[in-house]
Amino acid sequence: MSLIAGELRVAPDSRYAVIASRWNPRIVDTLVSGAEQALRANGVAADAIDVVRVPGAWEIPIAAARLAAAGQHAALLCLGCVVRGDTRHYEHVADGCAQGLMRVALDHRLPVLNGVLAVERHEDAAARAGGAHGNKGEEIALAALEMVDLWRKL
């Protein structure tokens, strides 16, 4: 039996795109910083990281589809924050974003990492953006490096 797994290593000449919403900037900016720092700490050059900002989480999948179609990036790191409110809008945005990102990943056979937080309260988001639960932006970046390495092995 053979085992094929990705490792934390930077593929030569690989570019990474961080697609991040501007909505909930205090949270999302912290996620973006965590992702950038993790990529850089693991050997990705600053000029190999493109940050694309979109209005909200709803717009992330369409930007991801455009970038995936262009074929310039080894992985897409998608970051945002959707907080439950008084209406069902939360479910529409969070579910639509997740489904859209999965569609981009499958259609383009590209690692598309979902770091869009879907939380009940702002405090829950803060806990995942550098708080008690770490920084999900950093975790997404590490997963991206592993997936790109795995893609090369497959």
Image (tube, rainbow, N blue to C red):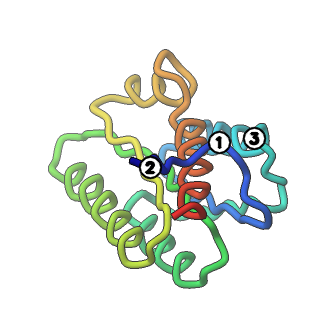
Q: Which residue is mark 2?
A: 2
Q: Image point 21% across, 54% down: which residue? A: 89
Q: Amino acid at mark 3?
A: Asn
Neighbour class for label 3 at 10 Å: few (<14), some, many (≥20)?
some
Earlier in the chain: of badge 2 and badge 1, it is 2
CB atoms of marks 3 and 1 within 8 Å: yes
Measured as percent of width and height from the top left, residue 84 is found at 26, 39
Q: Is residue 121 left or right of residue 135?
A: left
Measured as percent of width and height from the top left, residue 130 is found at 57, 25
In this rendered view, identify the residue nearer to me: 120 or 116. Answer: 116
Earlier in the chain: of badge 3 and badge 2, it is 2
**How far is disc 3 from disc 2 in space, using C-alphas?**
27 Å
**How far is disc 3 from disc 1 in space, using C-alphas?**
8 Å
Q: Nearer the viewer, mark 2 or mark 1?
A: 2
Neighbour class for label 1 at 10 Å: few (<14), some, many (≥20)?
some
Q: Is residue 92 left or right of residue 145?
A: left
Q: Which residue is mark 3?
A: 42
In which quadrant of the rendered view does residue 11 lie?
Answer: bottom right
**How far is disc 2 from disc 1 in space, using C-alphas?**
19 Å
